[in-house]
Image: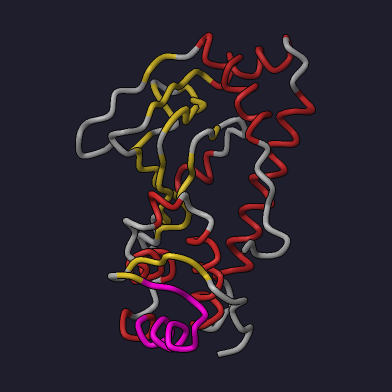
Amino acid sequence: MKSINEPVKNEAAIVKLINIFKQNAKDVHIEPEGKDFEFVENGELLVLLLCEGKMDIYKTSDNLLYASAMAPFILGIEGSLYRYNHYRFRLHHQCVVKTLPLKQCVELISAHNLIKTVLDYQAYLNDYTASRIELLVNRTAYEMVRGLLYELEKLPYEIRIKTSIINYIKYRSNLSKSGIVSIISTLRKGGYIEVCRGKMISISRKLPKKY
């Protein structure tokens, strides 16, 4: 079951861009405990290519887990210093990441006539940002939980079954644990979600819009 009007990620287009960009890219070493990625190196802006794995994006103001980017993913083409100063980008040890200077990336875009592909991808990023605002800003606690449950359901089963529902929602919303537990318990008793040992198996029925 999918939520309505969700941003569409064109993975084929992203892979096409990565395959061209990585010819000029270098590998990023990630320590076992993970690594915060910096988009500026020696005064030069970088583009990040997430080839495998997951990257978590946190707001620096309150350490809210704003989003988790799953491979394939590219970040940095827009060259936004504002974004880099207001968010923290955490790479997991299992990630396969490459990087190249923004200047080289722009040259490759021009040489391979990739402007349309890049614009389509940037439109997806803009849509995703808008969807986060729609989910988290001026929403009730239930509306945030409802939206995040639909988001959690979209994760691959092997990842979802290892993910705590409470932690997933808490880290992404800053809602209180007790409030989240109460809502989850009500939805579970109502037969809306199937839960096993704190992990979500599935959404069994369309979640009500109001609590």
At horizontal 61% and vertical 14% (from top left) the residue drawn is 20
Q: Which residues are magenta?
A: 181-195
Q: How many marks?
A: 0
From the top left corner, tell me how far across and down residue 142 is, in percent. Answer: 51, 83
From the top left corner, tell me how far across and down residue 78 is, in percent. Answer: 62, 34
In the rendered image, the vertical position of residue 36 relative to residue 180, given as above or below: above
Identify the residue at the far left of this view: 32
Left or right of 88 in this view: 106: right
From the top left corner, tell me how far across and down residue 156 is, in percent. Answer: 47, 49
Instruction: Identify the coloring.
Output: secondary structure
At horizontal 35% and vertical 38% (from top left) the residue drawn is 91
Asked whether 67 or 186 is in front, the reply is: 186
Quadrant in the picture for the C terminus: bottom right
Can residue 99 be seen in the rendering of this structure? yes
In the rendered image, the vertical position of residue 166 relative to residue 179, given as above or below: above
Rendered image quadrant of residue 105: top right
Asked whether 31 or 206 is in front, the reply is: 206
Q: Does the stretch in magenta take in 187?
A: yes
Quadrant in the picture for the N terminus: bottom right
Q: Does the stretch in magenta take in 160?
A: no
At horizontal 47% and vertical 22% (from top left) the residue drawn is 44
In the rendered image, the vertical position of residue 177 relative to residue 58, given as above or below: below
The prevailing secondary structure element of the residues shown in magenta is helix
Asked whether 134 or 163 is in front, the reply is: 163
From the top left corner, tell me how far across and down residue 143 is, in percent. Answer: 56, 79
